Image (cartoon, rainbow, N blue to C red):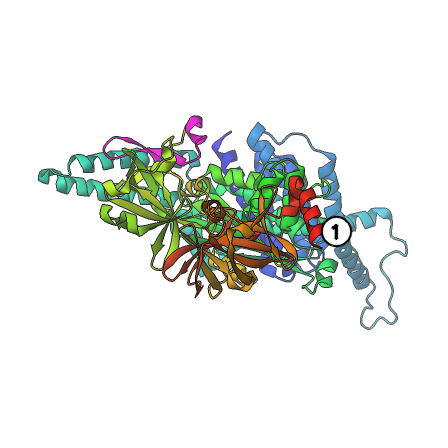
Amino acid sequence: MDDLTREFLIESQEGLDRMERCLTDLEERPDDAALIADVFRSVHTIKGTTGFLGFQRLERLAHAGENLLGLLRDGKLAANAPIITGLLQLLDALRSILKTIETDGHEGQGSSTEAEIIANLELLQAPAIETTAKQTACAQTLPVKGRGSPKSTAPAEPPPATELASAQAVAEPFPSATEQTAETANADSARPRSASSASAASAAESTLRVDVTLLNRMMNLVGELVLTRNQVLQATAFDPKMTLLSRRLDMVTADLRESVMKARMQPVSNVFSKMPRMVRDLSQSLDRRVRLQMDGQETELDKSLLEAIKDPLTHAVRNSLDHGIEPPAVRESVGKDPEGTLRLRAMQEGSHVIIEVADDGAGIAVDQVRQKAIERGLISAERAALLPERELLQLIFLPGFSTAKEVTKVSGRGVGMDVVRTNVEKIGGKVEIDSRAGKGTTLRLRIPLTLAIIPALIVRSVQQSFALPQGALSELVHIPAEEAATTIEWIEDAPLYRLRGKLLPLVFLDRLLTPSGAPSNMRDRDSFIAILDADGRRFGLVVDGLADPEEIVVKPLSSALKGIGLYSGATVLGNGDLALILDPGAIAMKAGVAMSGEEEAARAAEEDRTDLTKAAEFLLVEAAGRKAAVALGDVLRIEQMPVKRIEFVGLRPVINFDSQLLPVDDTAGVLAAAQGDPEAPIVVVVCRDGNRHVGIAVSHVLDVATGADLFEAGTSVRTGGVTLLKESVTGIVNLGGVSDLAADPGAAKEWNSMAEVMR
């Protein structure tokens, strides 16, 4: 392909992109003359150049569109929905031919579809042609002053040839492409240049198109330069003679890296601009009324990342329209505005760009997600029953998952949300979802600003170096060896650290990396806690040591290391050592850290919480030397009795309470410890759990206290969370984890017979 054709393709694609944006805006502002003029210029430019290059298919299509746009520009037609649709069809046809030229070097043969588009564009011109013909006929029958009665100079029945000539004169009101170009040039030279046109010319003269491949090559070279810079800095750290030169190299490298990265940055509007057309077409095909809002379009992102998020963003928008926003009648029936709102928002947070797709639709039915996942064999029923709501929502990203009742052109094949997560994770990003039934759904794409070079903290564990991206790091905490035993608290097997009065789950890096999974002895040396925020999870990563931060160059992982699921890449450190780059989100999920969520989600969850709140009161008990707490509102009675009062149904302990058999929970082993002494006193706390009553065996009742800080640890089925009571970390008993005897088939018969005897 010659340079002239390549330049034509680039300019034409830019013109069509601008035309698409203008047409979607024109539907909302049909009287905007500036928009019509902009669309006309795009089509006119393509037509003028195609004649010179010999692309006849493009010229015929552009000519038909130009005629229609000329009538719009002259005010002879109004930009209604059918006209906008026809022009969008023209745009798609032009774009398809340009793609063929780019791929094959020629525009190929014409098709019946193009003939239909041209016929439709000519049909849309008919009202203006008829109006012009009537005006012409009217002018010919006007009376001549002083001649008496009017006489028509036109024949009563004009011959077909006359009508055809008149119609052709109206349908082709413009001169040839060469004449138009000459006229435009003369008019432009005669017209004084405005400030805006002068500015546009200046911008065109000061810019240069650069191939993305060349930019990628430059970025790779800068990455190698950064690695060399890091090695030089470490090698000359103790050489005073080289200090000045190494600092100069550091500054120049940093400036060069910044300049190359800026050259690759593009505004998110380049992707957002495609959405109005898609929302328009989908809302019409799905019988929806949708108002699209776009914020933060000036936010910039790396060119390669911008291309990578096009498909995920497209799938997310289609999903919001198909599954989220309801039809107008349904929205009105539940008291909503019949017109739904779809919001696209881009913003920068630290080293990431957050792109949100939010709708005010029906939200996601969590129970339906659970049921569909079980039906499709994506998860076991036992596992699904234990997952909290926010974790259940993550199931929609599994391959093959879909809640659609039937397969349509828009959805139902179970690949949409899987594509979203897969494509975003390929570029080092993360996907988060938050949904409330009846309120709507928000999908967040967390995209790194660049893939090539990132700032990182170098940490040490199991005598190896690892790179920890600073984008997820909020602070560092030093734990002296002598304070490790008192600083870190344990609930069952879950370590916790109290940071400024708030409980923080801990993850030992060496415990994840070693096959045995046993943590090293923190009393032997100092340790450090890296406080991380990743994918809505906040936790502390315990490491053995720290090194100086570095700017690292991200290198891809081999397939073997990808399968481990703890690393996002590899790099070469300044000392020449290889280091793996830790993935904080993957570490949190593998360690079982519960999702804390954004502030807005936390506030919403706090509104729905009716049982355990920060101001809730708890009954503080001790069971076999361990402290626990029961929500005071669930406690019915506290019974002290000898252990011999406990009876057994099968292997399940029960007590006779108000002529009813109550199951007794003995997770702590209180009953087992007292089996040798039938008179040994025990305490059973009788609680209400919904419609049933259960008992909890404890050693002592200590106090009543108010929970100062609640943290959903998710460390055990029987643990409903962790709270600070009387300045002590205490596990909260989850009554739902107390087994129901009636649910045990082996004990059901004995249970029923004993209950019958008691009655």
Q: Is residue 193 visible?
A: no
Report x, y in % for residue 477.
29, 50
In the picture of the structure, the residue carrying the numbered disc 1 is: 124
For the C terminus, which image quadrant?
Answer: bottom right
Specify start and end residues of the magenta stretch as a single range: 559-581
Which of 241/97 is in front? Answer: 241
Residue 568 occupies which quadrant of the picture? Answer: top left
Three-letter amino acid code of the residue under disc 1: Leu
Residue 498 occupies which quadrant of the picture? Answer: bottom left
Report x, y in % for residue 141.
83, 64
Report x, y in % for residue 255.
28, 45
- Residue located 71% across and 51% down the image: 757
- Residue located 67% across and 40% down the image: 745
Reply yes or no: does residue 567 show up in magenta.
yes
Q: Is residue 269 visible?
A: yes
> Which secondary structure, mark 1?
helix
Report x, y in % for residue 17.
56, 46
- Residue occupying the far right of the picture: 156
